[in-house]
Amino acid sequence: MASRKKPIVWSIAGSDSGGGAGIQADLATFHNFAVHGCTVITAITAQNSFAVGHVSVTPRRTLAAQINALDSDLPADVIKLGMLADEGVVSMVAKYLEGYIGFVVCDPVMVSTSGGELMATGVCECLIEKLLPRCDLLTPNLSEAEAILNRKIKGLDEIERAAADIVALGARSVIITGGHLTARNNERHDYWTDGIEGFWLSGANIDTLNTHGTGCTFSSAIAAAIARGYDLRDALVIAKAYVSQGLRMAVQLGGGPGPVAHVGWPQRLADFPSFSRRLPALGPRPVFPSCDGELGLYPVVDSADWIARLLVCGVKTIQLRVKNLQGEALRKEIQRAVALGREYNARVFINDFWKIAIEEQAYGVHLGQEDLDVADIAMIAKAGLRLGVSTHTYYEVARAHGLRPSYIAIGPVYSTTSKQMPFSPQGVPQLRRWVGILGGDYTLTAIGGIDIKRAKEVLRTGVRSVAMISAITQAEDPEAVVAELMALHEAAAT
């Protein structure tokens, strides 16, 4: 078979003659995500924006022919399942998936936006029995989750239990979408779990009636993002942003609800969700002070001696990252770093040790993603410290966005030797994308494998701060390197 670079995603779903949902919405989404979409049409519907007039289920022989034609020539990297109109369709699809090793996203389409029934009586039970065990992700809305569980779900507080129960039925993971639930803090909340871990994605409540194809678009965006190589958590974040953008830009075309718009990769922070382990509480989030301007050159060093040496050079932002001290020796090192920051009127951030930073009234703390699981974020905010957060992926940016920190660190831009990283380098193009998305709302710094030569390229993305470790601390003449880097930052700022 000839090699190919473009991922292939199948949509096994129904055709919407109105063009807003089903196969039509899936193909529009696949195009926006630069994947090749193939289709196995399970039913032809006669519908428009306000009613489903007729549903014709694809004959078994025709369904099998479509699957066989694609399997022999255009095998799927990911399969998205949509409308599976009767038990025969469910059984045939389930049989094919027994030998399929790729990722499967299932949107259990039961009712259209206009209220038309799209799944015959008894099909839900068949889907649970035969298909759920092969679904890597199920994406039901509230009414679909209620049908699967055969019970009412009374509000956001019951969603976590409902999701866990759906996983217990056989699905490998599930995200229950919150568009049909009451908004909280003027946000809509989706909940994902695999039965072990779980988290909420919260996005702006978009006041629109033009929601046709929301579920189809969400699930196909997840499938496309996974086919592009994104982790499931990243795919969920990207897909929610894509749908939020589509809802914001949707327009009415007929007499009923208009279709979700398909306008390309999401580029606005307003469309991106925030991430939290628990359902966001009512009321405002903790607030962190700003950093009072761009961070500029941002050395990361392992001792107060290095801080003293670099502050003399005019550095105004620096981080103490101590790994080999504990007890009283650690506290004294942090005390000295904080005192140096006050003496030189500089922003000294303490990495990891947030309790001591609070006690010593530091300027700020910097936390990695693993530290966010154990740190008392509300206590840090109450103490008035600035907060910086490391991010490497879409999901981690969503997690940072949920905290509204004082700054966000993006990396690794290049390969780095200072720390073992489970992530591939993001590269300059992705950094430029992050600057475009986040730069209007957050103070940013870029980190990871950056030296003087690379710093010029990084600063051309529009980021106004570069965090550096070995390029400074391992240099033959650190002071000269710092002077050159500070000049580069000043030139980029003008």
Image (cartoon, rainbow, N blue to C red):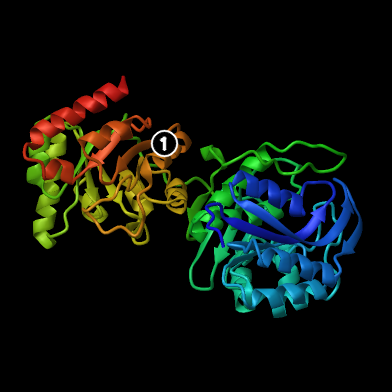
Q: Is residue 364 left or right of residue 303?
A: right
Q: Is residue 152 visible?
A: no
In the rendered view of the protein, which quadrant contains the C terminus?
Answer: top left
Where is residue 324? Give x, y as percent. 13, 60
Which residue in the protein does label 1 denote? 432
**Which residue ends up furthest to the bottom in the rendered image?**
129
**Which residue ends up furthest to the front in the rendered image?**
1
In the rendered view of the protein, which quadrant contains the N terminus?
Answer: bottom right
Amino acid type of the residue that numbered disc 1 sits on in the rendered structure? Arg
Q: Is residue 1 above or below residue 126?
A: above
Where is residue 378? Give x, y as percent. 38, 52
Q: Is residue 341 above or below residue 460?
A: below
At horizontal 79% and vertical 71% (from top left) the residue drawn is 89
Q: Is residue 263 left or right of residue 108?
A: left
At horizontal 60% and vertical 74% (from top left) the residue drawn is 167
Q: Is residue 171 visible?
A: yes
At horizontal 10% and vertical 31% (from top left) the residue drawn is 480
Where is residue 394? Give x, y as percent. 46, 50
Marks counted in the figure total 1
Q: Is residue 456 above or below residue 394?
A: above
Q: Is residue 248 above or below residue 332?
A: above
